[in-house]
Image (cartoon, helix red, strand yellow):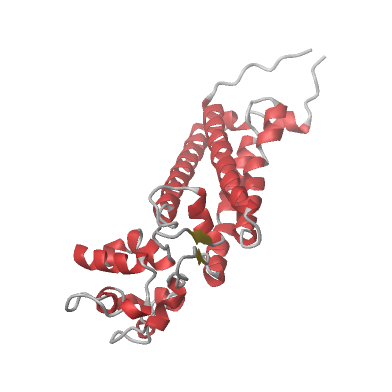
Amino acid sequence: MTRSPNTEDRWTGVLAKLPRGARLMLTAFLAIIGTGYLIAVLNIYHSHSKADGVDGMSLDDIRAVYSGLTVARGRPSPSRMLTMIQTTMREYISSEEDFEVLQAWLKEGGGKDTFDEGKGKKTPRRIIMRNCLRCHSASTDTDISKHAPFAPDEWDVKHAGLSEFLSPVAEPGKPTRVPPQYQIPRLILVSHMHMLSIPMFTLVVGLLFMTARVSPGVRGFLTPLPMLALVFDFGGWWLARTADVFIFAIAGAGGVFGVVFGIQLLVVTIDMWRPMREAGSD
């Protein structure tokens, strides 16, 4: 007697039955999504690996971005501005000498009393005027000036306009407590961008994985993990300000997402091109 397939069995292996053109389209889609995710991981490393003032990615980089960081005496004092000039904004600083002067000032905490110290025009104030105010002054009306305005116009920069992006002044002989580099407005922007995009392709890949010819137990365990990891990851961004344990949630959820999502992509791609076996009977 022929076994009556249940609903799950009817969908298993359905991708391998699609026309070749449809399978080529889905394979290209999965390749683009997979490559895009790898590039996103590289971008995270590039953007955050110096957030704690030390080269290389660590839990302290996550703390510096999302919850704030206590910096021991003698270590460079990281700040949002220091991280940015070392990573995504490096290309906009016109000379190596300007970069070295500005980096040294920021590592020392970006103090108001040293804002105009330097040789000739090589002071932090003048370097910021030459390199940053073309985009970061409010009068330019650029998107970046709306999120990070350093000054009202391009003609001068006040130290008070930079204070949000600098480290707090350390008390002599005490560790420095640096606030999170992602302040609430920035966190809102990043959260809305990621929450409205990543779950969409995660859902598509998860649904495709549900049709793969692997054991029901494996499908049932792996299918929801990436989406659940996103819940812990996104939630951790906000809750890390309240307890350090959520730093581990961010790191752990990111690792789970990457590994399981990669497995799903590979399994779906292979299963799509694996020949179908003849249906058996009882």
- Residue 255 visible from this viewpoint: yes
Could you tell me residue 71's position as x and y percent?
A: 48, 59
Location of the C terminus by quadrant is: top right
Q: Considering only vertical position in the picture, is 12 above or below 244?
A: above
User: Which residue occupies 47% across, 36% down?
Assistant: 24
Q: Quadrant of residue 105?
A: bottom left
Could you tell me residue 95's position as x and y percent?
A: 20, 65
User: Which residue occupies 30% across, 65% down?
Assistant: 104
Instruction: Residue at the far left: name it.
Output: 120
Could you tell me residue 268's position as x and y percent?
A: 56, 33
Location of the N terminus by quadrant is: top right
Left or right: residue 39 versus residue 252 is: left
User: Which residue occupies 35% across, 68% down?
Assistant: 106
Asked whether 8 or 146 is in front, the reply is: 146
Asked whether 96 or 8 is in front, the reply is: 96
Could you tell me residue 92's position as x and y percent?
A: 27, 66
User: Which residue occupies 68% across, 41% down?
Assistant: 224
